[in-house]
Image (cartoon, grey):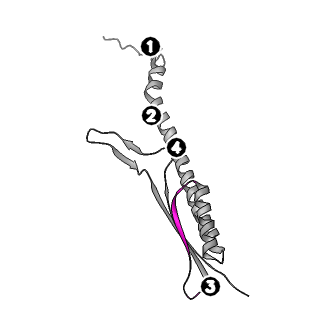
Amino acid sequence: MTQVRALKYSGPAKRKACPGQNLVELVLTLPFTLILTFFIIDSGRAWMAYESAKMAVRDAAYTASIFQNPEVGQKQLDLRILASGLKGSGTVSQVPNQHAYRASIEVEFTPLFGEMAIPTLSGPINLLPTTIPIKYENVTDVALY
């Protein structure tokens, strides 16, 4: 007769100790995590600077259009452009046959980080332009009561 032996369950198999495994995993994942983190921070900073420039342009056009004199409005517009540090120009004029004034402004916004490009063998791939044009026009009707 043959004897049947019962197998005994002794729990999970024991693993060998690998003392450097955690360090290797950290070295492999840390660069990608840092690149992603700094990309998110830098993109947020660039977006905030662009939105600030747009608000400065909008404010300059509004300020220039509320004056009832195109010459005074033009001086205010030039002062606002100079104070913002943006390169550009604008014009203030009266709307024909109306008691309204139009201020048009166009500036060039240069991002803080400059040109963002990925170097490749066939030449760099530009992700963002070096300058971004911002245009805005405001018309204010001066009501006389």
Q: Is residue 29 visible?
A: yes
Vertical comparison of 128 with 68: above or below: above
Question: In this orientation, which residue lies closer to the viewer: 119 or 32?
Answer: 119
Q: Secondary structure at mark 4?
A: helix
**In the foreground, 105 or 26:** 105
Magenta stretch in the rendered image = 85-99
Nearer mark to the viewer, of 3 and 1: 3
Indicate whether 43 appears above or below 31. Answer: below
Label 1 sits on residue? 16
**Callout 3 secondary element:** loop
C-alpha separation, residue under disc 2 versus residue under disc 1? 29 Å
Quadrant hosting residue 28: top left
Q: For label 3, count other residues whose C-alpha is less than 10 Å away and answer few (under 14), some (14-19) or many (20+).
A: few
Of residue 24 and residue 40, the one placed in the foreground of this image is 40
| Residue at mark 3 | 99
Residue placed under numbered mark 2 in the picture: 32
Q: Residue at x 48, y 39 (%)?
A: 36
Relative to 117, 11 lies left or right: right
Q: Earlier in the sequence, mark 3 or mark 1?
A: 1
Labels 4, 3: front one = 3
Q: Residue 37, percent across and down?
A: 51, 38
Q: Which residue is mark 4?
A: 42
Distance between the alpha carbons at the discs numbered 3 and 1: 87 Å
* Mark 1–mark 4 distance (CA, rounded to whole Å): 43 Å
Q: What is the quadrant of residue 143 in the picture?
A: bottom right
Tell which circle, 4 or 3, labels the residue nearer the N-terminal end: 4
x, y percent for residue 40: 51, 43
The image's mark for residue 104 is none
Question: Earlier along the polypeptide chain: callout 1 or callout 4?
Answer: 1
The residue tagged with tag 2: helix, strand or loop?
Answer: helix
